[in-house]
Image (cartoon, grey):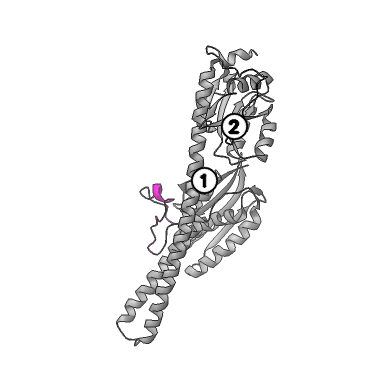
């Protein structure tokens, strides 16, 4: 491999005299991971980007020489802004495997992935960018110093903006929790005084109906507050080990109680394999509870039935919940995961929104379809 082909047709900017004293940057540098089995590529990258700065912050490089070594580093540190990733290393697709594991196994949606390959036949550009969430793609033979600098600037700007969005999301969640707390205090006060007035009035007074309406509406407002608080409290979809069978048992116990409260004798058909997945048990339970509760409500009124399965299909663990009622209409289908969208007059409409928050946080695929029997089928694909 000729290392000068990396930056052909462009003038390289080399660092100054090595004997001079380096000036330490005043701000924390951007952390960049170089993943390539060619040592010369590491040297050339450090040389070209040695004096690069973005927003007054220099670059700090970490070198790894295989895909497995890169994953080990990324498992230990999550503050890398950019990874410069080769495709062909210990295997012909080692770099693609790293990209897949970054997004799915490590669930890191922030780090920017720049793919550099000397053998583009192993990584067609359109395929890897669309299917693996690659942020930039270059053939080494056409990658000049200017192009690398431009690509690095774009990647860091994107990384910075994603961090700002996440910070703002956290601030909004805190505000939502605070507002929910304040509203809950007021609803309790309103409901309490309405109860006092009701006890002081004659039971046959026409005002009693107004007071019952006040009590009913404050209870609905309390349900909204609880749902918003539950949504806002999902701060991080952290990495844990969840035993699917144990989580399923606890979740379905709650769902049985929900069915009893509805006065419905629902048949729950459960088919679950013994698996351990990477998820917080409470969040996995929340997904199961919301999907199964939704299926219970919309199952057939005369002979309600819900099928729940958790199986391995290809490269995914698949959680599937299907009811035997009437499927979601084409008009409503695009909006079912939106906050407060519901076709049930008494419901809040946050259950499926919470499901979407958790599944997207873990980068799980969620699809909805109609079964042959006419009911709705919710399918959650969890990468192995």
Question: For the residue labelled by badge 1, is the local secondary structure a helix, a strand or a loop?
Answer: helix
Magenta stretch contains residue 330? yes
Residue at image point 60% right, 49% down: 238
Taking the image as shown, residue 147 lies to the left or right of residue 1, namely left
- Residue 21 pos. (x, y %): 65, 24
* Quarter in which the N terminus is drawn: top right
Q: Is residue 233 above or below residue 313?
A: below
Q: Is residue 111 above or below residue 331?
A: above
Residue 232, labelled with which disc? none
* Quarter in which the C terminus is drawn: top right
Taking the image as shown, residue 299 lies to the left or right of residue 283, namely left
Question: For the residue labelled by badge 2, is the local secondary structure a helix, a strand or a loop?
Answer: loop
The residue nearer to you, when weighing 29 against 61, is 29
The answer to whether one can see residue 324 in this image is no
- Residue 151 pos. (x, y %): 51, 25
Q: In the rendered picture of this protein, how many numbered marks are placed on residues?
A: 2
The answer to whether one can see residue 259 in this image is yes
The span picked out in magenta is 325-346
Magenta stretch contains residue 180? no
The residue wearing badge 1 is 360
Residue at image point 54% right, 52% down: 235
- Residue 7 pos. (x, y %): 56, 15
Furthest toward the left, the residue is 206
The residue wearing badge 2 is 25
Query: Quadrant location of residue 13?
Result: top right
Label 1 or label 2, whichever comes before in sequence order: 2
Most common secondary structure along the magenta stretch: loop
Say few, some or many: other residues with alpha carbon within 10 Å of mark 2 (under 14 / 14 to 19 / 20 or more). Answer: few
Say few, some or many: other residues with alpha carbon within 10 Å of mark 1 (under 14 / 14 to 19 / 20 or more). Answer: few
The residue nearer to you, when weighing 348 against 102, is 102
Taking the image as shown, residue 91 lies to the left or right of residue 303, namely right
The residue nearer to you, when weighing 120 against 52, is 52
């Amino acid at each position: 491999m000729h290392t000068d082909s990396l930056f052909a047709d462009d003038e390289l900017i080399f660092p100054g005299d090595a004997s001079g004293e380096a000036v330490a940057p005043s701000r924390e540098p951007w952390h960049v991971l170089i993943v390539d089995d060619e040592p010369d590529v590491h040297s050339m990258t450090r040389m070209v980007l040695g004096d690069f700065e973005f927003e007054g912050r220099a670059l700090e490089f970490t070198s790894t020489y295989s895909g497995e070594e890169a994953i080990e580093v990324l498992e230990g540190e999550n503050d890398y802004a950019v990874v410069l990733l080769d495709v062909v290393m210990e295997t012909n697709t080692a770099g693609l495997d790293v990209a897949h594991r970054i997004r799915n196994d490590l669930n890191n949606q922030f780090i920017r992935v720049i793919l550099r390959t000397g053998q583009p036949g192993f990584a067609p550009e359109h395929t890897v960018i669309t299917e693996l969430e690659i942020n930039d793609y270059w053939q080494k033979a056409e990658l000049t110093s200017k192009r690398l600098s431009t690509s690095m600037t774009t990647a860091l700007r994107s990384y910075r903006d994603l961090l700002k969005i996440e910070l703002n999301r956290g601030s909004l969640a805190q505000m939502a929790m605070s507002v929910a707390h304040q509203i809950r205090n007021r609803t309790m006060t309103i409901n309490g005084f309405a109860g006092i007035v009701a006890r002081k009035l004659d039971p046959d007074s026409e005002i009693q109906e107004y007071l019952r309406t006040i009590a009913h509406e404050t209870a609905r407002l309390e349900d909204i507050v609880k749902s918003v608080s539950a949504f806002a409290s999902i701060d991080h979809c952290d990495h844990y080990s969840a035993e699917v069978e144990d989580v399923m048992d606890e979740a379905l116990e709650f769902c049985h109680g929900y069915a009893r409260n509805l006065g419905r004798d629902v048949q729950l058909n459960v088919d679950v394999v013994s698996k351990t997945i990477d998820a917080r048990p409470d969040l996995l339970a929340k997904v199961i509870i919301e999907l199964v509760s939704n299926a219970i409500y919309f199952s057939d009124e005369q002979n309600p039935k819900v099928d729940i399965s958790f199986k391995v299909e290809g490269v995914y663990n698949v959680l599937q919940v299907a009811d035997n009622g009437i499927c979601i209409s084409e008009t409503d289908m695009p909006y079912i995961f939106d906050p407060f969208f519901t076709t049930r007059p008494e419901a809040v409409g946050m259950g499926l929104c919470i499901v979407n928050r958790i599944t997207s946080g873990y980068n799980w695929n969620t699809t909805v379809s109609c079964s042959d029997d006419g009911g709705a089928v919710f399918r959650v694909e969890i990468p192995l």
